[in-house]
Amino acid sequence: MPTPDLPALPAATGAARARPEALWPGLLLSLLLAAAAFALGRALPLVGGAVLGIVLGLGVRNALPLPARTAPGIRFSSKVLLQAAVILLGFGLDLHQVLRTGLSSLAVTLVTLSVAFLTAWALARLLKVHHVLGTLIGVGTAICGGSAIAAVAPILRPDEHDTALAMSTIFLFNLVAVLLFPPLGHLLGLSQAGFGLWAGTAINDTSSVVAAGYHYGQAAGDIATVVKLARATLIIPICLALAGWQLWRARGRDGDRPDLRGIVPWFILGFLVASALRSAGPVPAALLGPLHLAAEFLIVLALTAIGLSADLRRMAATGARPLLLGLGTWFAVAASSLLVQALLHQS
């Protein structure tokens, strides 16, 4: 969330390059809260550690002024450690299962992607939201939340205000999704596979997908993770298409070429390598349980750090039109995912 002491664009690369000593204040704060959330989640499994982590992070962030020196560690926890958790989850999935799940979800993913962009474009025109802000919200909803916005920002070159508004809008619906999707899934009678596919195609950010999926069940979490990672790879063709559009608009003007660095989600390759190692057999079976437990804790840690990044007062001050655009796009994606699943008998 854009706040005076927590910058609007928490890029994983920036967090990774920070000096180690600069990470400790925010990392220790995130670890302490995450440990409490993880322990409480074991005692209250119906709520879960991920949800409790978000709630604890939000409570501390909005009740106490956080020193600026905590920002690097919080960014590191919410981005880099989340990516580490995703890689560890790969050790629990057979590569053949990953490929089958990714391919079987392709139809739903492509439909929801198209729906997201069309809805964001139409609502931006209807609500008189600037096309760049509408595109940022559409990309964030369609692909992978804040990570997608960060990837396309060097291409679209929005001003900081538009980037902050898009991040705030996407972040709000990530929080809502973690809390709302599991009970809705039970209300709709979705199977583990059906919920995993729904969460993987309809929730924005990777952390929220993983949290909601594993809260619903182990199988749902596995499927949601694979579907989400397959969906995240689509940021590459989307960035290339946006870059081509920008180049066409900038034809004849020198020095206005879009920046394509950072569009490849490298942690997905790590996930696939981990899954391949699991499939090939060199990973001892005795290690699989501890690896999954470590991934579960890192997810709680990342969600706690995300809660620590959210200033609810500034979120409420972003204005109604971007929130309405985000809400409409998010609802359209969630509904279209369920509709396509029902038509294909995948729910």
Image (cartoon, rainbow, N blue to C red):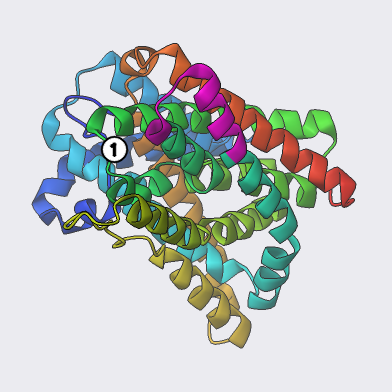
Which sits in the foreground, 258 or 38?
Answer: 258
Could you say whether the residue bearing mark 1 is in a helix, strand or loop?
loop
Report x, y in % for residue 284. Answer: 55, 81
Q: What count of labels does the image hold? A: 1
Residue 115 among those drawn in magenta: no
Looking at the rendered image, the quarter that the N terminus falls into is: top left
Report x, y in % for residue 67. Answer: 14, 27
Report x, y in % for residue 88. Answer: 48, 64
Q: Is residue 178 visible?
A: no
Q: Quadrant of residue 216?
A: top right
Q: Is residue 172 visible?
A: yes
Which sits in the foreground, 260 or 188?
Answer: 260
For the point 63% across and 69% down, the residue is: 93
Q: Start and end of the magenta stretch?
A: 118-133
Residue extending furthest toward the front:
252
Residue neighbourhood size for the residue with mark 1, other residues' Cα within 10 Å, grouped as few (<14), some (14–19), many (≥20): some
Relative to 106, say whether 309 is above or below: above
Which sits in the foreground, 331 or 289?
Answer: 331
Location of mark 1 (residue)? 158
Q: Amino acid at mark 1?
A: Pro
Which sits in the foreground, 317 or 44?
Answer: 317
Relative to 106, say whether 203 is above or below: above
Q: Quadrant of residue 303?
A: top left
Most prominent secondary structure in the magenta stretch? Answer: helix
Relative to 249, say whether 287 is above or below: below
Report x, y in % for residue 55. Answer: 45, 25
For the point 32% across and 51% down, the residue is: 155
On the rendered structure, is 337 left or right of 9?
right
For the point 12% across and 36% down, the residue is: 69
